[in-house]
Amino acid sequence: MMRALMHARPPDRFDPWKFAVNGGTLAGEWSVATLARFAELLHEPVGSVRWRLAGERDADGRKLVHVWLDAEPRLSCQRCLGPVTLAVQVDALLAPIAAESQAPQLPAQYEPLLAGDEGVSIAELLEDELILALPLVAMHEDERECAAGGYALPPTAGPAPVADGKPNPFAALSSLLKNPKDA
């Protein structure tokens, strides 16, 4: 039987084992600015994060917390350093564990959710999942978007320009390279 936990404001913490046993659900939409660790990684902490948690059990009776997140954070483009908005979606199955030593025993499709006696902070859980979902290097898909913000596009292929007619100081090193015919 699925029982929805209805809260005007979700609790700060929840017990993931009881949540899974009861088939609980929690959902909300929070401002990005309220998630401090996540917000500090962004170009600007604007927008919102839509989220949903559902308690479940798998075929083996393992207790799970299903996490869905949807956000469009404004990150810093690593090419032009301007703002770039990227879609971030998370769909993860978390298995609560009491100790890190239990993590290797979980099936590969489940992420461990370390939970103590005090339960799990919803905000910290959401932040962790959002941070893990961010790209390593955020960039505009089309570098012309960077150029529109003043970024100088790299020149197309061709030899490096000679500055003021001076020869390249490393040109003499080319004579030190072995000729394949001499080997």
Image: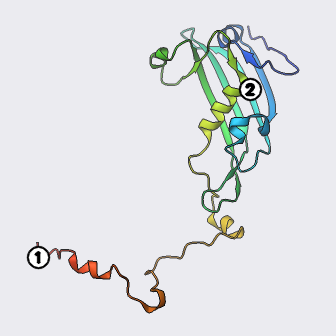
Give whichever of discs 1 and 2 has the lower sequence position: 2
- Residue at (32, 82) in percent of width and height: 171
Judge by depth and name the residue closer to the eye, 2 or 67: 67
Q: Amino acid at mark 2?
A: Arg
Q: Which residue is mark 2?
A: 52
Q: Report the disc number at residue 182.
A: 1
Q: Is residue 127 left or right of residue 62?
A: right
- Residue at (72, 27) in percent of width and height: 123
- Residue at (65, 19) in percent of width and height: 65
- Residue 55: x and y in percent read 68, 15
- Residue 129: x and y in percent read 63, 32
Question: Which element type, helix, strand or loop, lies under badge 2?
Answer: strand
Report which quarter residue 168 is drawn in.
bottom left
Q: Amino acid at mark 1?
A: Asp
| 59 relative to 143, above or below | above
Report which quarter residue 5 is drawn in.
top right
Q: CA distance from mark 1 to mark 2?
A: 69 Å
